[in-house]
Image: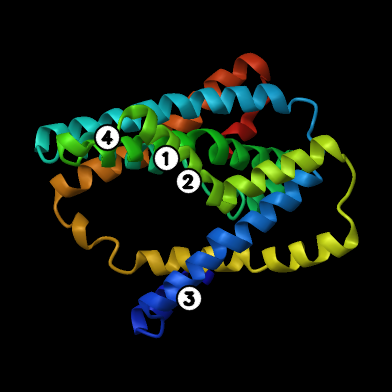
Amino acid sequence: SIQLLGFLIKRSGAVTPVTEAGIGHYVAVIGFPCVLFSALAELQPAAGILPLMLVIGSAKALVFGAAYLIGSRSASRAGGAPGEPLLRGALFAIFGTNSDDVGLGVPILGILFPGRVDALYVLAAMQALLFNPLAYVLLGVSGARSGEPAVRPSLAATLCTVLVGLRSNMLVLSVFAGLAYRLIVAAPLPWFASYPIELLGRPFQPLVYLIGGFGFVGAFDSLTSLPAAVLPLAVVALKSLCLPMAAFLAMRWVEPDGDYIFLY
């Protein structure tokens, strides 16, 4: 219902691009980092969380590689700038592995499998610290290759630039801070810290649904022909079918009753 409301508001023109950008900026820079920091700082992981993380991490790595190959090969066949295959491959890899573990996963898993909710925050941390930075590095290398050969920076310089840029990534910083607090202090957050952090993170969930509704406006205009829809549908199939199936089959060897893996 919130996504439908977001669609109608955006469709009516009541939400301008500036307003939409401001809402998205709040979610990415304040709301989600506060939610993730608070959850990781007070995390009480279940006993079987390590095998679960290994299984899902392996499945995501396979999907990351497959999505990258689909994007880079399609760009190579279409021609273009030298860095275009890396650019499209990195974008496809992000789209294929990045999921709404907290905004959508926590409410669903909290009802069906209440004891597994903490795993979603660890999954979000894995995505923020491992797969997203890897995609950022690929994007940085793509940008370097797109320049003139005489002024292209070296691979080492590009890697350093990307990694230094992560210092201003609030999602990465919140994950590092939350895990550091959990490992070093290992105690609940004091009230003077937990209350404002919780208050700032509270708008995250409704706003992320609202943004999802905004995204539906005009989203299908470029998919009116079958050729234009093939690549997006391939990434959707990787993310929605191949990822959970690969994780499920691998999890059967670790925990035969782990049917909840499909929710990831």
The residue indicated by pointer 1 is 161
The residue indicated by pointer 4 is 86
SS of the residue under disc 2: helix
Judge depth for marks 4 and 3 and give the one in front: 4
Q: Is residue 38 above or below residue 146?
A: below
Could you tell me which residue is drawn at 89 percent across and 56 percent down? Answer: 190
SS of the residue under disc 4: helix
Could you tell me which residue is drawn at 86 percent across and 53 percent down? Answer: 189
* Residue type highlighted by circle 2: Gly
Pick the front one: 208 or 27: 27
Measure how far apart labels 1 and 2 are at the Cα level: 6 Å
- What is the count of numbered marks? 4
User: Residue 68 appears at what percent x and percent y?
Assistant: 32, 31
SS of the residue under disc 1: helix
Chain-order first, disc 4 or disc 1: 4
Image quarter of the C terminus: top right
Q: Is residue 108 above or below residue 73?
A: below
* Residue type highlighted by circle 1: Thr
Would you say residue 240 is visible in this rendering? no
Could you tell me which residue is drawn at 34 percent across and 39 percent down? Answer: 140
Pick the front one: 199 or 231: 199
User: Residue 77 appears at what percent x and percent y?
Assistant: 11, 32
Alpha-carbon neighbours of circle 3 within 10 Å: few (<14), some, or many (≥20)? some
Pick the front one: 73 or 235: 73
* Residue type highlighted by circle 3: Leu
Q: Which mark is residue 5?
A: 3
Label 1 close to label 2 by CB (< 8 Å): yes
